[in-house]
Image (cartoon, grey):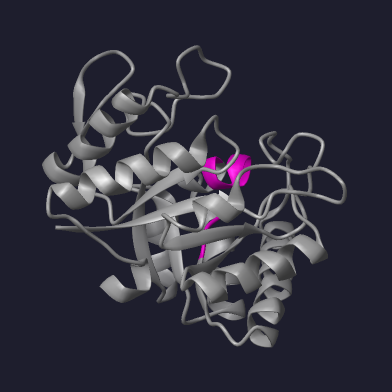
Amino acid sequence: MRIDINADVGESYGLYKMGEDNELFQSITSANIACGFHAGDYNVMFSSVKLAAERGVAVGAHPGYQDIQGFGRRNIEMTPSEIYNCVVYQIGALKAFCDVNEISLQHVKPHGALYNKGASDAQTAKAIAEATYDAAPNAILFGLAGSQLLIQAENAGLKTAAEAFADRTYTEDGYLTPRSTPQSVLTDRDLILEQVKNIVIHKKVRTLSGSWISLNAETICFHGDGQKAAAITRFIRAELEKEGISVLSAGDMK
């Protein structure tokens, strides 16, 4: 068995520090770097790509709605063409930083509300997929396992990686529990470990209501802004490797 471990990083902005990126980069294999719309800025984007290059971590663009105040977690009504342009813009910005640091752009993973909208809405997913293909045709598109985003990515001719979440709970239909719902986020490392092992080893996850659903994932996400994110990610990776599970970047598995 093998799995990619990714994290949302590069979310600091100006004088404001977010997350534990330096420590996280010691445990993850793929980095989703914010592109300046929901978080991050040009200085943080450059330093994040540079750090990834130094640590041998694969780089991905993490485009979101233009919503720094809401951290990209509020839905913004946009037409498919606006979403397309918004995603192309952000991929292009991060790809330029990859070029100057002589590292390839491995993947694209939408952020927050844009990710969730793309998971269920075919038009949004199609716009994201087409933007990714046009801006970075060799990139892997990360999307929620079983979602519209993966369907539209395959239709566009992209490589895909089905994603699951270490620290988020699930609804009966396989979507992430809305953050407005109590117990939508897991913080206890033993509960996170139990969920990750069930996903990676048994291909299933327990929903918030207590039932089980099938879940086949190639990459597991840890949120860089979570409590003790670096320590928990390091712990989970070590436990997976004890089980004989290889931890590789998504690109190395394709």
Residue at left offset 55%, top offset 58%: 32
Q: Is residue 89 magenta?
A: no
Residue at left offset 20%, top offset 38%: 197
Task: Please state if 14 lies on the left or on the right of 231 as rendered.
Answer: right
Q: Which of the 4 quarters of the picture holds residue 247?
A: bottom left
Q: Position of residue 124 (x, y in %)?
A: 57, 52
Q: Viewer-proximal residue, 147 or 92?
A: 92
Q: Is residue 110 magenta?
A: yes
Can see residue 63?
Answer: yes
Can see residue 123?
Answer: no
Which quarter of the rendered picture does the C terminus lie within? bottom left
Task: Please state if 41 lies on the left or on the right of 195 as rendered.
Answer: right
Q: Is residue 83 above or below residue 75?
A: below
Which region of the structure is painted magenta? Answer: 108-116
Q: Is residue 159 above or below residue 183?
A: below
Q: Viewer-proximal residue, 213 or 5?
A: 5
Residue at left offset 56%, top offset 43%: 224
Residue at left offset 70%, top offset 77%: 97
Task: Please state if 66 lies on the left or on the right of 201 as rendered.
Answer: right
Q: Viewer-proximal residue, 169 or 56?
A: 56
Q: Position of residue 230 (x, y in %)?
A: 49, 43
Q: Position of residue 225 (x, y in %)?
A: 60, 38
Q: Position of residue 50 (x, y in %)?
A: 64, 73
Q: Which of the 4 quarters of the picture holds residue 52?
A: bottom right
Q: Viewer-proximal residue, 175 or 58?
A: 58
Q: Which of the 4 quarters of the picture holds residue 47?
A: bottom right
Q: Is residue 204 above or below residue 11?
A: above
